[in-house]
Image (cartoon, rainbow, N blue to C red):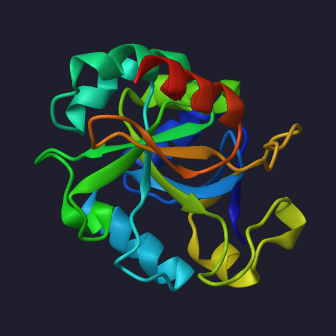
């Protein structure tokens, strides 16, 4: 039977030891673990996921961004501050600390500094980023409620953290920041603000 965890410190300890868990993110429920090739490969197996699909990295705060990406152009700094914390994923060129197993073979990585108290508490307790992907078997619909989790996943993850107030299930906005100006890859939360910011500042 899957282990239900209710204490964030216990979640942080499990993840630090390479365990894989189900955790609520700022947009949807996710499968998560520390940033390592071993953990990434385990998650691929659990989800029956194409290894060419990249993971998302979530970070405790903006200062951690430099641990995972190459230099940020000066004009992007204010844009990043305008997007974060929040449900906006920014794509950057990765640095050597991020393996291509994490990025699905790409030279870029999507990063988010979320605004979701329980997730922020976990990240601050860990003092490192996490990889995440949606809580579903590959090609199946995303899961918005705990009761709809595929039993195959429940059998293979190490724990689940339950929360009274679930994620809002709204998709994040994804913005490519690898060029001279940001390019919107997917429209989601805060999209009008982001469009206006790009129009007025780039």
Residue that appears at 39% across and 65% down: 54
- Look at the image and tell me in which quarter the N terminus lies: bottom right
Q: Answer above or below: position of 123 versus 54.
A: above
Q: Is residue 161 visible in this depiction of the protein?
A: yes
* Percent position of residue 27, x then y: 70, 45
- Look at the image and tell me in which quarter the C terminus lies: top left
* Percent position of residue 50, x then y: 43, 83
* Relative depth, front residue between 173 and 117: 173
* Percent position of residue 164, x then y: 89, 39
Residue that appears at 30% across and 62% down: 103
Q: Is residue 35 visible in this depiction of the protein?
A: no
- Relative placement, left or right, of 102 versus 123 is left
Q: Answer above or below: position of 141 versus 14.
A: below
- Relative placement, left or right, of 164 versus 87 is right
* Percent position of residue 90, x then y: 43, 40
The quadrant in which residue 7 appears is: top right
* Relative depth, front residue between 58 and 93: 93
Which residue is outermost to the left?
96
Q: Answer above or below: position of 170 versus 44.
A: above
* Relative depth, front residue between 8 and 109: 109
Residue that appears at 49% across and 38% down: 12
């Amino acid at each position: 039977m899957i282990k239900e965890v209710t204490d964030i410190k216990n979640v942080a300890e499990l993840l630090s030891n390479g365990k894989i868990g189900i955790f609520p993110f700022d947009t949807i429920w996710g499968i998560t673990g520390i940033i390592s090739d071993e953990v990434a490969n385990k998650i691929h197996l659990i989800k029956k996921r194409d290894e060419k699909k990249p993971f998302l990295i979530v970070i405790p705060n903006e200062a951690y961004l430099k641990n995972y990406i190459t230099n940020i152009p000066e004009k992007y700094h204010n844009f990043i501050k305008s997007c974060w914390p929040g449900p906006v994923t920014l794509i950057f060129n990765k640095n050597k600390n991020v393996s291509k197993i994490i990025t699905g073979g790409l030279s870029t990585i999507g990063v988010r500094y979320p605004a979701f108290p329980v997730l922020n508490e976990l990240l601050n307790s860990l003092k490192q980023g996490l990889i995440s992907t949606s809580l579903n078997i590959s090609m199946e619909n995303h899961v918005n409620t705990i009761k709809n989790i595929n039993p195959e996943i429940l059998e293979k993850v190490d724990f689940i953290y339950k929360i009274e107030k679930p994620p809002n299930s709204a998709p994040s906005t994804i913005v490519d920041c690898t060029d001279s100006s940001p390019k919107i890859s997917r429209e989601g939360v805060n999209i009008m603000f982001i469009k206006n910011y790009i129009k007025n500042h780039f």
